[in-house]
Amino acid sequence: MYERHHYVGGKVVEGTSGRFGPIFNPSTGEEQGRVALASKAEVEAIIEVADKATEEWGTTSVVKRARVLQNLVHILYREKDKLAEALSSEHGKVFSDAQGDVQRGLEVAEFAAGIPHLIKGEYNDNVSTGIDMYSMRKPLGVVAGITPFNFPAMIPLWMSCVAIACGNTFVLKPSEKDPTVPMMLADCWKEAGLPDGVFNVVNGDKESVDTLCTDPRIKAVSFVGSTPIAQYVYSTATAHGKRCQAMGGAKNHMLIMPDADMEQVSDALIGAAYGSAGERCMAISVAVPVGQATADKLVEMLKPRVEALKVGHSMDPAAEMGPLVTKEHQAKVRAYLDLAEQEGSKFVVDGRDFNYSMQGYENGYYLGGSLIDHVTPDMRSYKEEIFGPSLQIVRTNSFDEAANLPTIHEFGNGTSIYTRDGDTAREFVNRVEVGMVGVNVPIPVPLAFHSFGGWKASAFGDTNQHGMEGVRFYTKTKTVTSRWPTGIRSGAEFVIPTLN
Ligand code: NAD
């Protein structure tokens, strides 16, 4: 049994609230540790430390800041497997997928190492005779990141790398389900040469989140998690005068046109629906074949592959998919699958009782893969996010009917289309009301130099994560109009200045 506390001012600080949450190993079902849950007063003390560090870090030269990011990149590459192992043991995703979690995060560090170029302002000389005008991007001060359980390396790095490169200090409130990797990231930042107090971790629950969203010293809140909490964080933080970007849940559709290469489609769907046991906000959870023949072919091809999915302990190199994150989440996913059956959809493959066949790991939170056909858009199991290893099939008869489904769905995170026809793909890309779209790519997660964000109930706020949108989120623009004494004409002016 181990304990995780907080990381403040460059060192681990023990929690004093007396409140703890359990940390499980989902592969075995064993409780392996506990995490301190901070009180309001503890969070305020951490904000104080971050606030004190703003002046020095905010005025550190941009080249020095970039060098810390360059160091961080090297350290993260070196530590990748250790981070991935810790991540896998608390989250339950298989080791190779956990390595990917770290990799996608360190790619944001690579992007942010280019901050001298990214943060450049604009300049016009001689906008009027003798007058120059320029703008610059200034840090905000202390900013907070509140992150979900499903990417404990990538999402804290999405936020902290850009925020810190821009000259802000950062308070991370990670998920209480897998707090070890965020604490290891704090050590990596320190080794990279980041001054104490710039990157801090507060472990906690609603009490911490509420404090971060209301304390006047926090200037911006970046959140990723489920939609109800995203909405709550967005409304609370903005009501307290903060910038906020809050990413929420998803229900991602993949359209399969009759001309698609069905081998590619089935490869894509197996990975995109069942990888990480479906606990990805960009997982494909709905397949939308166009035409009954396409649907029949899809079911015929997927059935044996879903039945043959290798489910196992997250550190088993042969496993393609590990357990769900907690017993509660396993029960929630199971309840959605029961609902799908009650609502009249048909199980082609039923993964519900899989954990009983996990010899030696019967207490792990496993579910097998489920493949569910004849799902219709009026079903609650279709409308809501399941976040487990299941793929629902909605049969359609035309491109228009299929393309309309992701457009009218409440969520709008990701979607993709499989087709050989360029016109159809282009029409879909332009028409669909979803933030991230793939063409013959199942999980279109933008790379670090583009930006990540959904539409509709999948994201609140108007800037995305990382890329130039991240730089804009974590900076404010100052615009200067400048004239030197020789350019000043004499006499007071009583009308609004116009330049000529
Ligand atoms: P969650 O909403 O339960 O938790 C996210 C964070 O909010 C955690 O730090 C948690 O401690 C905190 N929190 C939980 N309940 C709270 C409350 N009542 N008040 C204040 N704070 C609270 O989400 P999760 O289960 O950790 O993550 C899974 C969800 O995240 C899924 O819905 C998934 O789609 C979504 N997600 C979205 C994206 C995206 O970019 N759109 C990415 C990853 C995950």
Image (cartoon, rainbow, N blue to C red):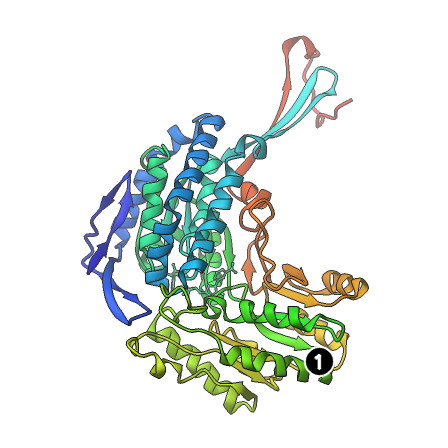
Where's residue 331, x and y in %?
38, 79
Q: Is residue 287 left or right of residue 294?
A: left
Query: In the image shown, does 437 or 378 lie closer to the viewer?
Result: 437
Quick check: can you spot residue 457? yes
Which residue is rendered at x = 55% and y = 71% of the image?
A: 270
Query: In the image shown, does 88 or 332 lie closer to the viewer?
Result: 88
Compared with residue 245, is residue 388 higher up or lower down, i.e. above or below? Answer: below
Where's residue 307, x and y in %?
50, 81
Mark 1 secondary-structure assignment: helix
> Number of numbered discs present?
1
Compared with residue 60, is residue 197 higher up or lower down, i.e. above or below? Answer: below
Can you tell me which quadrant of the image ligand 1 is in?
A: bottom left
Where's residue 248, x and y in %?
51, 62
Q: Is residue 249 left or right of residue 78?
A: right
Q: Is residue 437 left or right of residue 88?
A: right
Quick check: can you spot residue 220? no
Give residue 367's quadrant in the image.
bottom left
Q: Is residue 168 left or right of residue 449?
A: left
Quadrant of the image containing the C terminus: top right
Give residue 25's quadrant in the image.
bottom left
Which residue is rendered at x = 62% and y = 79% of the image?
A: 301
Query: Mark 1 is on which residue type?
Result: Thr
Question: In the current view of this chain or complex, which residue is farthest to the right?
Answer: 423
The residue indicated by pointer 1 is 294
Question: In the current view of this chain or complex, which residue is farthest to the front?
Answer: 318
Which residue is rendered at x = 53% and y = 34% of the image?
A: 115
